[in-house]
Image (cartoon, rainbow, N blue to C red):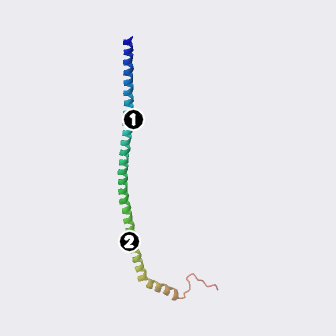
């Protein structure tokens, strides 16, 4: 009977060691999953920061281009305004003279379609 109880004791001890090993493996697994999750988060954060940096660079290039384009358009507009003002000042006197001569110099004539009724 002692040999049987020794066998049972050995089995119980083996079972306990197996249970401990399983628990230890589960703990390692949980620890490794947590570590993998942290690594994945760090990697995604790094990728996100890289993409945001690229986005900011592209945005600054585009916005810089737009501001340059806006300045260029503003300059062209001012140039055109000056050109039109100069043309206006140059031609204003002659146009006013033409209008006044058309309005003030009246030449009475009978219209072609006028018919006298007798």
Label count reads 2
In the rendered image, the quadrant that contains the N terminus is top left
Does residue 89 sit above or below 39 in this rendering?
A: below
Q: Residue at x 37, y 15 (%)?
A: 6
Which secondary structure lies at badge 1?
Answer: helix
Q: Residue furthest right?
A: 118
**Residue 57 picture location, percent across and down:** 35, 57
Identify the residue under disc 2.
Answer: 75
**Residue 14: mark in rendering:** none
- The Cα–Cα distance between marks 1 and 2, rounded to whole angstroms, is 66 Å
Which secondary structure lies at badge 2?
Answer: helix
In the rendered image, the quadrant that contains the C terminus is bottom right
Identify the residue under disc 1.
Answer: 30
Q: Residue at x 36, y 62 (%)?
A: 64
Dot 1: few (<14), some (14–19), or many (≥20) neighbours within 10 Å?
few
Q: Residue at x 38, y 71 (%)?
A: 75
Q: Quadrant of residue 74?
A: bottom left
**Residue 100 picture location, percent across and down:** 49, 86
- Nearer-the-camera pick, 60 or 65: 60
- Nearer-the-camera pick, 100 or 15: 15
**Residue 41 picture location, percent across and down:** 38, 44
Dot 2: few (<14), some (14–19), or many (≥20) neighbours within 10 Å?
few
Q: Which of the two discs, 1 and 2, labels the residue nearer the N terminus?
A: 1
The answer to whether marks 1 and 2 mark residues whose Cβ atoms lie closer than 8 Å is no
Q: Residue furthest front?
A: 2
- Nearer-the-camera pick, 10 or 66: 10
**Residue 45 picture location, percent across and down:** 37, 47
User: Which mark is nearer the camera, 1 or 2?
Assistant: 1
């Amino acid at each position: 009977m002692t040999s049987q109880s020794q066998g049972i004791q050995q089995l119980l001890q083996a079972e306990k060691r197996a249970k401990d090993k399983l628990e230890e493996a589960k703990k390692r697994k949980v620890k490794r999953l947590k570590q993998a999750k942290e690594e994945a988060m760090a990697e995604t954060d790094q990728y996100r920061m890289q993409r945001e940096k690229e986005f900011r660079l592209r945005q600054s290039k585009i916005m810089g281009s737009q501001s340059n384009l806006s300045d260029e358009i503003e300059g062209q507009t001012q140039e055109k305004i000056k050109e039109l003002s100069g043309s206006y000042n140059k031609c204003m006197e002659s146009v006013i003279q033409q209008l006044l001569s058309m309005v003030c110099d009246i030449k009475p004539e009978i219209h072609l379609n006028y018919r006298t009724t007798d």
